[in-house]
Each structure stands twice: as C-alpha cells, then as structure tokens.
Image (spheres, rainbow, N blue to C red):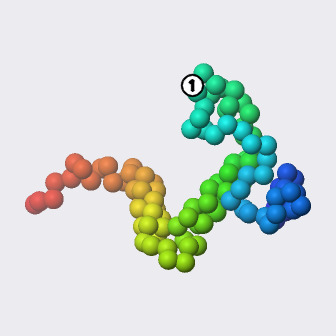
Amino acid sequence: MGWGEYPPEYNARVHGPYDPARYYGKPDTAFGEVKVGELGGWLGRRKKSPTAMAQAVSRAWWRWNHKFTFPRKAGIAGPMQLICGSMFVFYVMNYGKLRHHRLYKYHW
C-alpha cells in the first residue's frame, strides 16, 4: 500500500463509500473485551510496522474529527481538547528546564 491509496482490504462494492475512520481489515476482539490471559495472543495479532501505526493514528484522528469538529453544532469540547493536549505536550517537552525553577529563591 502506497501513500494516498485505499487499503487493500477495501472493496467499494462491499463497503460502500470509503470512510477514513474505519478499519477495513479482518475484525478482531475489541481491546475492552480482551481478558488478561488472552492479551499476549491479542497483541501478537497486531501489525507493528510503522505504516500500520501511522494508519491507526490517522483513523483515530478522523474518528475524533467526526465526533468533535465535523458536526454542524459542534461545541467547544474539540478545541479545548486540542488546547489542553498541546499544553500537556509542551509541558512535558520543557519539564527539564521547568523543574529547576522549583528551587529558585525569588528575593534579593
């Protein structure tokens, strides 16, 4: 599968219009329904290539968009999630610099 192509599992006659938020591969047990003893086998059936990881992130992004930004009367939840998520990411990125400020004395 190359960039910009449909997944090989997608068949327009069977699946209808293409939805980027849907996984067209063989359905498997949902993560929430996996028992602890079956977790190793479930993880073994996952694709672990960088392409598969990028596809999973892309599907999650499209699902998030369909839920929070594409509805006609979308509220403030989607932008606030992006803002709070970016604040957390930048805090983690700058934690090495910020942790030294705990010990500073701000007086003369």
The mark tally for this picture is 1
Q: Is residue 30 above or below residue 104?
A: above
Q: Residue at x 50, y 77 (%)?
A: 73
- The quarter holding residue 57 reads bottom right
Quadrant that contains the N terminus = bottom right
- The quarter holding residue 98 reads bottom left
Q: Is residue 54 visible?
A: no
Give the amino acid type for the residue marked by disc 1 in the picture: Val
- Reading the image, the residue beneath label 1 is 36
Residue pushed farthest top? 37
- Residue 108 locus on image (x, y percent): 10, 60
Q: Residue at x 72, y 62 (%)?
A: 20
Q: Nearer the viewer, residue 106 or 32?
A: 32
Q: Residue at x 44, y 67 (%)?
A: 77
Left or right relative to 33: residue 75: left
Q: Is residue 61 above or below residue 42?
A: below
Q: Nearer the viewer, residue 27 or 76?
A: 27
Residue pushed farthest bottom? 72
Left or right relative to 1: residue 72: left
Residue pushed farthest left? 108
Left or right relative to 87: residue 35: right
Q: Is residue 74 above or below residue 58?
A: below
Q: Nearer the viewer, residue 39 or 108?
A: 39
Q: Residue at x 57, y 25 (%)?
A: 36
* Element class at badge 1: helix
- Residue 32 locus on image (x, y percent): 56, 38
- Residue 85 locus on image (x, y percent): 45, 59
